[in-house]
């Protein structure tokens, strides 16, 4: 978190800060109207990637469109939060993150175990409502760590379900005997990119005084803006994960999805043309 120094205590249009956390970017340095400029700008990448995923989604199934659209909503909330460092805007950042992760949990649970009936979405909705209320009415470290615990549990559950489902599908994918990119490629990139993102997030959170570029204990002469890079790499990991869930979903349906690079750089999925009518 940001240290309490004159360099970080600059005031701006949205002052005073009411959020439960202040990240390691120097506040109101670039613009009087934007509290954390680089964290705000990098949040727009989240919106872009969510909309790109929605555009490239190979099917019309609502679950996947919701998954990609929630990524965009997270980006909008993150932009508002980092631009203002106000508590209400923080909720617009953090709560959609929990909603997005819950949507992914719903998808991978039903992909692995099949439709669960009405009790499952009702249970998830109830849990979300209770989490929303608790996170909204608390503040400080209680609010911050409640959110982190909730989000962390969801992430671990998704990792477990996707990796175990991959083991179950490995024989099917191997039997295709094609050179096309498969779920193993997506898993490696999802886990690798997200692990790197978490690492720099932890550095930004716990070692700010050593990397902020302005404090007396900083070993750097400039701030590398680790939280801004967290936005870029973490959402890339989420994007890979969403593609992975889509891939696994259609393997379970007996289809043969594959990964290609749209315009040579953006991973996306394609399905065999003779199967498209089954998934619209």
Image (cartoon, helix red, strand yellow):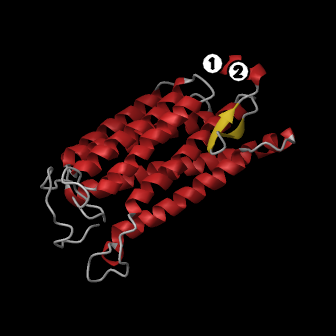
- Which residue is most to the top? 277
Q: Could you classify mark 2 by the number of other residues whose Cα lies within 10 Å: few (under 14), some (14-19), or many (20 or more)?
A: some
The vertical placement of 69 against 42, above or below, is: above
Q: Residue at x 65, y 33 (%)?
A: 249
Q: Residue at x 39, y 57 (%)?
A: 228
For the N terminus, give its image quadrant: bottom left
Q: Quadrant of residue 191?
A: bottom right
Marker disc for residue 280: 1
Query: Along the line of sight, which residue is nearer the eye, 19 or 14?
Result: 14
Label 2 secondary element: helix
Q: Position of residue 10 (x, y in %)?
A: 16, 63
For the C terminus, give its image quadrant: top right
Between the residue at mark 1 and the residue at mark 2, the CA separation in whole angstroms equals: 6 Å
Mark 1 touches mark 2? (CB < 8 Å) = yes
Q: Is residue 29 left or right of residue 201?
A: left
Q: Quadrant of residue 252?
A: top right
Q: Position of residue 237 (x, y in %)?
A: 54, 51
Q: Position of residue 185 (x, y in %)?
A: 70, 50
Marker disc for residue 276: 2
Query: Along the line of sight, which residue is nearer the eye, 96 or 111?
Result: 96
């Amino acid at each position: 978190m940001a240290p309490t120094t004159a360099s970080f205590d600059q005031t701006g249009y949205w002052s005073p800060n009411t959020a439960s956390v202040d990240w390691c970017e120097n506040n109101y340095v670039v613009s009087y109207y934007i509290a954390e400029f680089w964290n705000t700008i990098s949040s727009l990448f989240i919106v872009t990637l969510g909309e790109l995923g929605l555009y490239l989604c190979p099917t019309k199934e609502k679950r996947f469109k919701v998954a990609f659209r929630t990524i965009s909503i997270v980006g909008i909330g993150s932009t508002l939060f980092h631009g203002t460092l106000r508590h209400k805007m923080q909720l617009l950042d953090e709560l959609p993150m929990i909603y997005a992760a819950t949507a992914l949990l719903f998808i991978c649970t039903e992909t692995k175990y099949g439709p669960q009936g009405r009790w499952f979405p009702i249970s998830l909705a109830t849990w979300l409502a209770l989490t929303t209320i608790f996170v909204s009415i608390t503040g400080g470290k209680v609010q911050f760590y409640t959110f982190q615990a909730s989000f962390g549990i969801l992430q671990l559950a998704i990792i477990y379900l996707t990796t175990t489902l991959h083991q179950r599908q490995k024989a099917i994918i191997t039997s295709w005997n094609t050179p096309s990119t498969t779920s193993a490629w997506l898993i490696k990139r999802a886990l690798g990119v997200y692990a790197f993102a978490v690492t720099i997030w932890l550095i930004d959170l716990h070692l700010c005084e050593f990397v902020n570029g302005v404090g007396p204990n900083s070993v750097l002469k400039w701030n590398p803006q680790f939280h801004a890079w967290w936005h870029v790499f973490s959402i890339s990991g989420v994007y890979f994960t969403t593609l992975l869930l889509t891939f696994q979903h259609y393997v379970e349906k007996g289809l043969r999805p594959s990964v290609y690079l749209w315009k040579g750089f953006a991973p996306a999925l394609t399905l065999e043309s003779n199967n498209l009518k089954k998934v619209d």
